[in-house]
Amino acid sequence: MIRVVVADDQAIVRAGFTVIVEAAGDIQVVGEAKDGYEAVELARALRPDVVCMDIRMPGRDGIEATRLLSSDEEGHIPVLVVTTFDLDDYVFGALEAGAAGFLLKGADEEALVGAIRSVAAGEGTLDQKITRRVLSEFAGRRSSPDRSTDAVAESLTPRELDILRLLSEGLSNQEMAARLFIEASTVKYHLAGLLAKIGARDRLQAVVWAFRNGLDAG
């Protein structure tokens, strides 16, 4: 069972999330928070598999709460940012704070459930509607790789580079497997090696790394 904490300042939204995700059968909402302060407190106490976090909340916002949970001394707590706002600064802030996923509230129920499962599995997710715009902007903001980054990039195998570039297009494991004419299990194997080499927790952070270091799909 995937254990989830829902953080949103609107009670009706929290209630709706609970109904939707618990209908999936393998997800349980174990706590609700109305702001970033409660979200951090609940998450640290309950250690859920995923925190579904709104961005704009009174007091401590979702980005600051995400940053605290991503750097928690007792272990990283994965955060899926779910918001009505797809403004670049919010998306960038969430990614830089260490969010494992970003989804717009306009997404359908299947997408929400799938995103929670993906984040819980350590894969991460980024709403397809904003993927290219966000990643293109990251490319514009990228800094020059330092020597240590160059060394890491040089250690990547050709197949790991393929996976990294396809990740930057927002493709799933199955889609990457089809593009490369290999099995999804093989993609998963190479992805695990890639994440270990670049020091990324999940596929979303790997995409951020790729764009910051000029190794995206271009």
Image: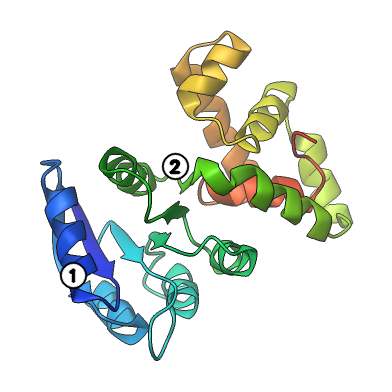
What is the secondary structure assignment of the residue under circle 2? Answer: loop
- Residue 147 x %, y %: 88, 54
Sequence-first disc among 1 and 2: 1
- Secondary structure state at the residue bearing disc 1: helix
Q: Which residue is mark 1?
A: 12
The spot of residue 34 in percent (x, y) is 26, 81
Residue 142 visible here: no
Note whether 56 is above or below 155 in the view shown. Answer: below
Query: Which amino acid type is marked by label 1?
Result: Ile
Q: Is residue 122 left or right of residue 114?
A: right
Q: Residues within 10 Å of mark 1 (few under 14, many from 20)?
A: few
| Location of residue 187 in the rendering, given as x and y in whole percent from the top left corner | 53, 23
Question: In what quadrant of the picture does the C terminus appear?
Answer: top right
The residue wearing badge 2 is 123
Neighbour tally class for label 2: few under 14, some 14-19, many 20 plus, Cα within 10 Å = many
Where on the picture, by quarter, is residue 114? top left
Residue at 46 percent of width and 18 percent of height: 184
Q: Residue at x 66, y 34 (%)?
A: 164
